[in-house]
Image (cartoon, rainbow, N blue to C red):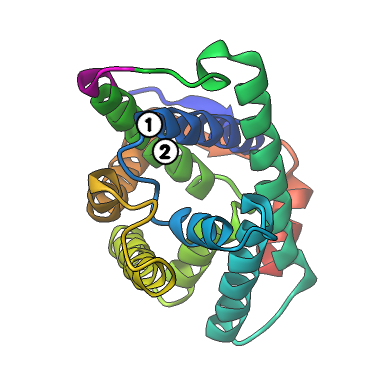
Amino acid sequence: MNKKTIYSEVLYILAIIILAFAVNLMSIADLGMSMIVCPAYILSEKFDLLTYGQAEYLIATIVFIIFCLVMKKFKILYLLSYLTGILYALFSDLIKIFIPMFNQNLMVSMNIRIIYFFIGMILSGLAVALFYKTYLYPQIYDFFVKVVAQKYQISIKFFKTCFDCSFLIISFIMSYVLFGELIGIGIGTIIMAFCNGMMIEQFQNIIDQYFVCIPHFEKLKIYLEGGI
């Protein structure tokens, strides 16, 4: 089979756009937020002084510190994972502005909500798989999984599932400590925690089967990969 060539930089942009669309789609479904999103969401709901974005940066900073401790080093280049987070937030906001279904409160049936959720979940898994196929740094959460798994030769599927489940447990604890009940956590959150790793691995296999991912900026790739 002749594989098609695709630039890593294209995969990076596609991953950001697809992830932003997926998260917006799952927000309409309202069946539970992603376990990675939950801690920041819970903090923003508890403390009026914190917006979701500010809470997200707080959680991301904590994860970044843990990442550096696990890697036993700190490099300025690691901070590029924050740039990806900024781009993701920008595309997420643009999607809400320019696509009508995302900028209004829709009353949809449970069947439609379930469909929206599963489409969003699948697209989210695809986006993360695309991130793993590019040399450009993903958000700190996926960057953590990708780099640590490579360093310690751990299966990404296994490590991603453990990482997500850890966030799920943290979200449960935060929710009950701060509110005494579940906030932002639903059946969809549980499903994603246990299925994300498997979906990502399957999408990676599909990408490898049909595409060859190459960098357009070879020197940038060497520089960034050397920074890890």
User: In the displayed structure, would residue 31 be above or below residue 44?
Assistant: above
Q: Nearer the viewer, residue 19 or 13?
A: 19
> What residue appears at the point 35 percent right and 73 percent down from the top-left corner?
173
- The tag on residue 153 is none
Residue beneath label 1, please? 120
- Disc tally is 2
> What residue appears at the point 40 percent right and 49 percent down from the top-left corner?
34
User: In the displayed structure, would residue 54 be above or below residue 70?
Assistant: above
> What residue appears at the point 42 percent right and 26 percent down from the top-left corner?
3
- Which range is magenta? 108-112
Quarter-wise, where is residue 111 in the image? top left
Residue beneath label 2, please? 124
Instruction: Give the Cα separation between the discs numbered 1 and 2.
Output: 6 Å
Please state if 174 lies on the left or on the right of 19 as rendered: left
What main secondary structure does the magenta stretch of the protein show? helix
Residue 171 visible: yes
Q: Are marks 1 and 2 in contact (CB under 8 Å)?
A: yes
Callout 2, which amino acid?
Ser
Callout 1, which amino acid?
Gly
Mark 2 nearby-residue class (10 Å; few <14, some 14–19, many ≥20): many
Q: Residue 25: x percent and y percent?
A: 43, 28
Q: Secondary structure at mark 1?
A: helix
Quadrant (top left, top right, bottom left, bottom right) of the N terminus: top left
Q: Secondary structure at mark 2?
A: helix
Residue 209 visible: no
> What residue appears at the point 28 percent right and 48 percent down from the top-left corner?
186
Please state if 3 lies on the left or on the right of 16 as rendered: left
Quadrant (top left, top right, bottom left, bottom right) of the C terminus: bottom right
Q: Residue 175: x percent and y percent?
A: 38, 66
Mark 1 nearby-residue class (10 Å; few <14, some 14–19, many ≥20): many
